[in-house]
Image (tube, helix red, strand yellow):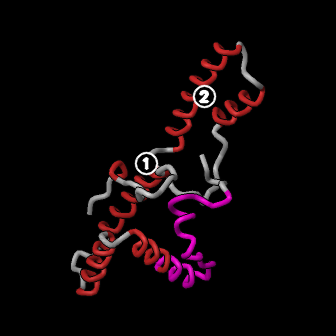
Amino acid sequence: MFIAVQFMELPKSSEKPCRACMSVEELMRRARELASKVKAKTDTSNGASSSNDKKQEKMVEEGKPMRADCPLDTEQLGKSTWNFLHTMAAYYPEKPSEEDKNNARIMMHLLGKNREEFSIWMCEMHNRVSRKLGKAEFDCSLWKQRWLDGWKDGSCDY
């Protein structure tokens, strides 16, 4: 199986930024650079910047913490994915049963399905584990907000 974040892309119809394509730190660095360029341009054109500009620049510099349940950035996704795959391989039986082999094939086959099917399947599997542990289940119809675009209220927006 091959997973490389740099090759991930959103559907062509998406107008949202690819959250998994760069880390929040990289995004904030780019925002600071852009803010500095805009500030320099504003300062030279009208001699000063407004207090609102200063507030916005300060928020960018501070890197306000985001919600814990936002889509992963590239560093979080990469580390988590490789940890999962290596752990899965490390615990794979030395002498796998036919069921073990079949389950591994299903897992790899599902990775080749389309995004919607795989994401809903993954959510349903997560909910099965949550039920066994007595935890709340996740509404799988919200998978795009939780794992791709961020919440509609904008709380995960950069």
Q: Which mark, by number, is residue 21?
A: 1
Between 17 and 118, the one lying in front of the other is 17
Residue 16, percent from left and from top:
52, 52
**Magenta stretch secondary structure, dominant:** helix
Residue 82, percent from left and from top:
36, 57
114 sits left or right of 51 in the view: left
Residue 154, percent from left and from top:
65, 54
Is 86 drawn above or below residue 38 in the view shown?
Answer: below
Q: Which residues are magenta?
A: 125-153
Between 96 and 147, the one lying in front of the other is 147
Between 98 and 34, the one lying in front of the other is 34
Circle 1: element type: helix
Which residue type carries mark 1?
Cys
Q: Which residue is mark 2?
A: 35
Q: CA distance from mark 2 to mark 1?
A: 21 Å
148 sits left or right of 46 in the view: left
Residue depicted at x 26% and y 63%: 1
Is 63 drawn above or below residue 120 in the view shown?
Answer: above
Is 21 drawn above or below residue 147 in the view shown?
Answer: above
Which residue type carries mark 2?
Ala
Residue 98, percent from left and from top:
23, 86
Dot 1, how many residues are within 10 Å of its Cα: few (below 14), some (14-19), or many (20+)?
many
Is 99 drawn above or below residue 67 in the view shown?
Answer: below
92 sits left or right of 131 in the view: left
**Callouts 2 and 1 close, C-beta under 8 Å:** no
Q: Quadrant of residue 37?
A: top right
